[in-house]
Amino acid sequence: MHVRCPDRVPEEVFRRVLEELAELSPVVQALPPSAALVELRGALRYHGVDPGRLAEVLRVRTLTRLGVDVRVGIGPSITVAATASGRIDGPGGVLVVTPEHVTEWLAPLPVEALHGIGPQQAHALRDYGIHSVGLLAAVPPATVQRLLGGRIGRLAVDRAHGIDPRPVVPRALPASAAVRHAFVRHTLDGAEVRAALLDLVIQLGRLLRRRGQAARGLTLTLRFVGEGRWEKSRRLPSASAHDDDLRTLAYQLMDAAGLQRGRLAGLTLRAEDLVEADRVAEQLSLDGARESRLAAEAVSDRIRDKFGPGVIGPAARFRRAS
């Protein structure tokens, strides 16, 4: 089963779709940012239903629980299933290609519809007159290898026949955590935006420390008035959950946006590729100022735990000053 979520689906929703898939089968391979593979052999025996019925159950669950429809392709191989999901019109649907009908179903499709054939390969094949998957399957393999290259040509011919021995390899999304801020008024980059970003850094650091996790990277997403978006990710020099390290990288990401007159509607700061904090080696530091800030960070966490998260912090100070 190859499952496609809507384009640009939020990561939190994508994770929940993966959880729904895991309820149907224990073998789920995440294909970020919005697709997944599911091995159905054991699941069909366990649930006692046909593949199409299982796919419709998935659609009902994602629609009712998450408000998201999905496109589901089912076939005897990854290539056939992924090609099928790509042929579904509209936001959702199910297309099942049975093993005995693979060849006749693939044959009339345009060559670029075959999963794994990119625009450049499709252009090269069309220049030679190969405009359908059926023609690709009929051309001598040696000819396709000359057009596309040895290994790619062999794979293209095999996949045109529906042959794809790759297994579904269980793979989850790397753990992540996100915090968000929505501006009451559409705001230009300035003191209020920087205060909001710093407040997000502190929220995110506190969340990671409470979970006992550390981040290897950060992603900053800026939402503009009119549904525009800007997003950029960078890696931390080493995994960390300390405000000091997260703040430095968050400011670099904001500077990379190069904002001038763009009016912001909101910010999202996401910690990526999380690891357990006890797996991160704490290096000895000769920087007394940093050690003092880390000690103050621990005290600040205890104050927020006792009196609430908004009692201290940059956003709180900005609100009092405005």
Image (tube, rainbow, N blue to C red):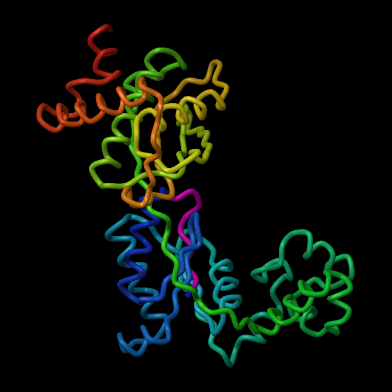
Q: In which quarter of the image is residue 57?
A: bottom left
> Which residue appears at 49% of the width and 48% of the height?
8
Residue 220 shown left or right of residue 297 in the figure = right
> Which residue appears at 53% of the width and 37% of the height?
232
> Which residue appears at 10% of the width and 27% of the height?
307
Q: Where is residue 138 in the image (x, y as percent from the top left)?
A: 81, 85
Q: Is residue 219 magenta?
A: no
Q: Where is residue 172 in the image (x, y as percent from the top left)?
A: 41, 63
Residue 204 vs 112, above or below: the answer is above
Q: Nearer the viewer, residue 203 or 180?
A: 203
> Which residue appears at 56% of the width and 16% of the height?
260
Residue 189 vs 299, above or below: the answer is above
Q: Quadrant of residue 92?
A: bottom left
Q: Give the range drawn in magenta.
A: 2-9
| Residue 225 in sight | no
Q: Where is residue 79 in the image (x, y as percent from the top left)?
A: 60, 75
Residue found at the far top of this picture: 321
Q: Is the magenta stretch mostly helix, strand or loop?
A: loop
Q: Position of residue 142 (x, y in %)?
A: 87, 81
Numbered disc total: 0
Residue 89 shown left or right of residue 128 in the figure = left
Residue 214 shown left or right of residue 150 in the figure = left
| Residue 135 in sight | yes
Q: Which of 169 and 319 is in front in this view?
A: 169
Q: Please state, as top left, top right, bottom left or bottom right, where the C terminus lies in the image.
A: top left
Q: Which of 151 and 121 is in front in this view?
A: 151
Q: Does the magenta stretch include residue 6?
A: yes
Residue found at the far bottom of this picture: 100
